[in-house]
Image (spheres, rainbow, N blue to C red):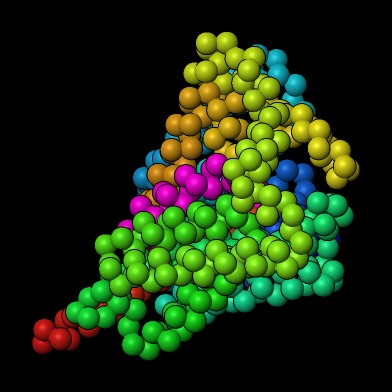
Amino acid sequence: MIYIILSLSFFSLGLLREKGAAPFILAIACLPFANSLSGYFYKFGLYSYDFFFIGALLSFLSKQIISGSLNLKIQKWALLLFATLLAYAATAAAAGAKLDVYFLRDLRPAIFALELVTAAIIIKNSEKILTAKTAIHIVILAGFTNLIWLALSIAGIISSDDEYYTTNNYKYFDSSTYISALFAIYFLSQRKARGRTQFNDPLRGIEIVAFLTSLISVVFSGYRALILATAIAALASSVKDPRKLFLAIATLPACAIAFIYLSTLFGADRVIEGLTIDGIFAQLSTRYGPAFDVISAFTPTNYLFGAGFGTVFEIDWFGYRSLDTTNNFVDSAYVTFFAKYGLMGILMLVAMVFSFRSISPTSLRTPISAYLFVLFMVYAISYQPASAGIIVGCILLRTLNTHLARQKDEKLVRLQN
């Protein structure tokens, strides 16, 4: 029932496009769209938030057709990614691949690509989505609600049927964690203008609160890769501003100490073991082993085009979690896409990065590239539910940046007059 209500609500908001984007962004920022809780928002291969993008895309295409001026100048990189994945699927189907649940699940990256296309359409009118102040308030809510869900998870008030998440209830991240990470990076990417940051005086206080809340949200998530990716992207974003670079460098040790302390406090042996070289290699071997089994059987052609659409991996350790041991991906976009699509798969990931760059504020384009390239090492983001937060985070920050840039220009005009 929850799935149906959310899906219908998001579809209705999607039909409104820019006018429906604000409540949708708020929902993604506040509701627990976490991998551990996907049971309430995932059915039939679709997440409930997919319907927002479906509605928005249908609304855009309908308007274009009715007006008689079909303008398809849309996100070329995401569209290329979608077309390539569709070509792989069609080739596999024509070759007699079994059209089972695993085949259908491999359409997730194609759906993700279409959502990037839709995001690019929505941000063309980004100034109509949110005001700057509202956008920053949503960022604060994203970090704050993330910490609330974490606290409820630790207390056992919200839990998953999956034993892995029950045992590791001290760790929590969802779509809002990605929003928090992107804002922290964006904050550090802002350059000074005439002795001031791009944020104007009325917003200075709340944007600092948003930055601190976002930082705490990411560190307390307990996920090493998310923290590392955010740290690397933060350094990349602040490298041209000595004050911001100093802030980023000074913050990193504090974050590392807090992370290690919390891991020790909650008895996170797996996390502590993963801080050693041997521990990292052992964990990566467990994560990537099923895909390496596929790659080890490659022919020369497979290195170029992979094992094909619908390729699955046998993950034995899923057994203790009472999960299907056959899965469409392993915990790495690089390894997953290479096993399925060979070198073409790596090019697909590059296209995905360029897609995100095109919907990000200019100052965030290099940092978000670094962020994604790190995340790809341990997350197959186009398959995972929380990843909607990256798309929504880009829409939110693009909207915020549009307003701040306009306010900055207006201020400069007033100073010149």
Q: Nearer the viewer, residue 65 or 236?
A: 236
Residue 383 percent across, percent down from the top left: 64, 43
Magenta run includes residue 97: no
Answer yes or no: is residue 302 visible.
yes
Q: Choose top left, top right, bottom left or bottom right for residue 148.
A: bottom right
Q: Nearer the viewer, residue 93 or 375?
A: 375
Q: Choose top left, top right, bottom left or bottom right for residue 14.
A: bottom right
Which quadrant would the C terminus be assigned to in this image? bottom left
Residue 118 percent across, percent down from the top left: 50, 51
Secondary structure mostly taken by the magenta-highlighted segment of the chain: helix
State the residue at coordinates (39%, 55%).
367
Magenta run includes residue 362: yes
Residue 183 percent across, percent down from the top left: 47, 67
Which quadrant would the N terminus be assigned to in this image? bottom right
Relative side of 415 to 125, left or right? left
Residue 147 percent across, percent down from the top left: 66, 73
From this view, report whether residue 102 is shown above or below residue 124: above
From this view, report whether residue 218 is shown above or below residue 271: below
Q: Nearer the viewer, residue 251 or 278?
A: 278
Relative side of 405 to 2, left or right? left
Relative side of 308 to 215, left or right? right
Answer yes or no: is residue 26 visible.
no
Tell me the magenta residue range. 360-385
State the residue at coordinates (30%, 77%).
197
